[in-house]
Amino acid sequence: MIATFHDLAGASVFITGGGNGIGAALTDGFLAQGAKVAFVGRSDATAFVDEMEAKHGNRPLFLQCDITDTTALQAAIATAADQHGPLKALVNNAANDARHDASQITPQQWDDLQAVNLKAYFFACQKAAEVMRPQGAIINFTSISYMFGAPDMIAYTTANAGIMGMTRSLAREWGKRGIRFNAIAPGWVFTEKQENLWATPESKAAFLARQCLPQPIMPDDMVGPVLFLASQASAMMTGQTMVVDAGVVGTG
């Protein structure tokens, strides 16, 4: 059972990639708190929006958008603020963890992956800070993959490390505006995409063996931590990374 964060009721929340995987779980979780959720995604999410409205009586605002189009992304954030009020929280969730051989990746592939995994995060932060109310929160998804140097995904792990540096710098630069910046670093979350593209029985078993808690991490496991970071329950927490990985890496 997820705790109730009373300050999120009626709050304006914007999520990138909020129509599938972890993002869909987050949209569902914020709606359950009574928040007004807007989200972007590349694919049509009308069926999901209808499902959420039927479940919560609270229809999220879907704005179809490729987050690598900075103008469109920032316009979507402005539209969300116009319709739902100044943002209480931004969740940068959308990412592309494509696998590749480091010796074979091309400059164009590198640029394309950084555009999704790092550039879009910054420009979402930039616009959200402009339309965010005092005591707002920005949560940037990174990953433990950069912490242990995961192979075969160098563009993704490089962006993940950059997200943490960006989060810390913006926490210090824009803290005077009353905006908090934190990152959340999941372990391997078994979304439908992961199951279809990367997970095999052998790779899953090997990874679960690295965890202190042996059960698979699912998208819903990200909801409570993100709600906490978005709410005033974490009011004096900024510039930090919250690791949610069932105990693979150590921090502190």
Image (cartoon, rainbow, N blue to C red):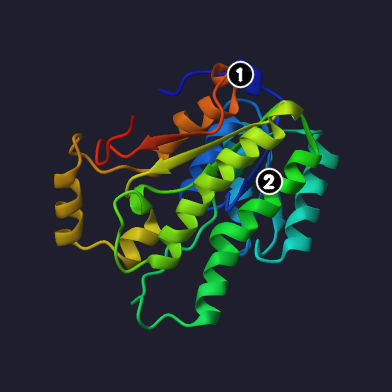
In terms of secondary structure, where does tag 2 sit?
A: helix
Label annotation for residue 232: 1
Q: Which marked residue is nearer to the observer: mark 2 or mark 1?
A: 2
Q: Position of residue 40 (x, y in %)?
A: 66, 54
Label 1 crowd (10 A; few <14 / some 14-19 / many >=20):
some
Residue at 20% across, 51% down? 207
- Find the distance from the CA under tag 2 to the CA under tag 1: 19 Å
Counting every numbered tag in the picture gives: 2
Label annotation for residue 65: none
Question: Which quadrant is home to the C terminus?
Answer: top left
* Residue located beneath label 2 in the image: 125
Residue at 19% across, 59% down? 203
Choose between 93 and 185: the one closer to the eye: 185
The amino acid marked with disc number 1 is: Gln
State left or right for residue 193 relative to residue 207.
Answer: right
Q: Taking 245 as reference, is 146 above or below it?
A: below
